[in-house]
Image: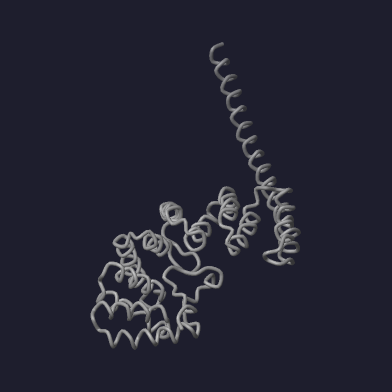
Amino acid sequence: MKYHTLIIISLVLLSCSQSTKQGTKENNKIEEVQLMNSEEVQDSIIEIHLKNGAWTKGLYSREWQEEIDKGLAKDSTIAYLWQQKAMPLYKQGKYELATKYIDQAVKYDKDQHQDYRAFMKCIFAKTYNEAILDFEDLIQRKGNSYVMDHSYYFYIALSKLQLNKFAEAEKIYESDIASQEKNQGKDWVHYLDYFYLGVTKYELGKYEEAIEVLEKVFPLYPEFAEALYYKAKCLRYLEKKDESIELMKKAIEYGKKGYTINEDNSIYERYPYQVRWELYQ
């Protein structure tokens, strides 16, 4: 009797187990279908209110914002709509409002939008400590990568430079440049990496070292006015007055011709240590 009871219990348990597995598979299939349907709906909203909506309006227009708001009213979890809502506001200098919206984009898709937010904090909003936190979190989660043509470490060092933490900035730039030269080759290093390391050394009073680094800029961008400008300032501190004066004249000439920082976003926002050449007569 006991033997038959054990068999019955075993069959019941086996049946429950198989039923549970079957139920799990069915639930997974339902979730996959729901996810696909959700993505299709979101793609449709983006198509209607962004591609055929906001993108047909002026970037800074009221209609741009209204079209995106219509899409968000249908689904407020679409991170890309929040990012596209924030972007023109940053370019208008409305940093506080823009940050409110980019935070929403990061909330719903951190992997896709956090490095963009960190870049905007560094170059546009100039909230450097917040930018550092974002970039450090990105490095911890994903490793050092690139946004807007520069490494995460580049922006951390630039933020440190803007916070007058010159020694920390110098250490990060030197390490990042050495890593790029070793792993991708010297041709990979951007002229701004050398420029900002040179500026950092200038701020530390290491004028000869600063000149040595700034010299690496010129094969990449011979007319770069800011590099000439800071080299001239270093020469002045080294009491090479005549050489400094001549180089400064050359820097001003090139600066007035537009040979300045040529990043894509420099048309919207002045970069750190970018000289206001229009002030020179």
Q: Note whether 257 is above or below 134 in the view shown.
A: below
Q: Note whether 114 is above or below 57 in the view shown.
A: above
Residue 193 spot, x, y in % from top left: 38, 71
Residue 158 spot, x, y in % from top left: 40, 64
Residue 229 spot, x, y in % from top left: 37, 79
Q: Nearer the viewer, residue 125 or 10?
A: 125
Q: How is the image coloured?
A: one colour
Res. 174 image quadrant = bottom left
Q: Is residue 37 left or right of residue 135?
A: right
**Residue at position x 54%, y 15% from top?**
3
Residue 238 spot, x, y in % from top left: 23, 79
The total of numbered circles placed on residues is: 0
> Which residue sits furthest front?
281
Picture quarter with the N terminus: top right
Res. 225 image quadrant = bottom left
**Residue at position x 52%, y 55% from top?**
114
**Residue at position x 57%, y 62% from top?**
93
Q: Nearer the viewer, residue 27 or 257?
A: 257
Q: Is residue 136 left or right of residue 39?
A: left
Q: Nearer the viewer, residue 257 or 280?
A: 280
Q: Note whether 231 is above or below 268 in the view shown.
A: below
Q: Is residue 241 left or right of residue 28?
A: left
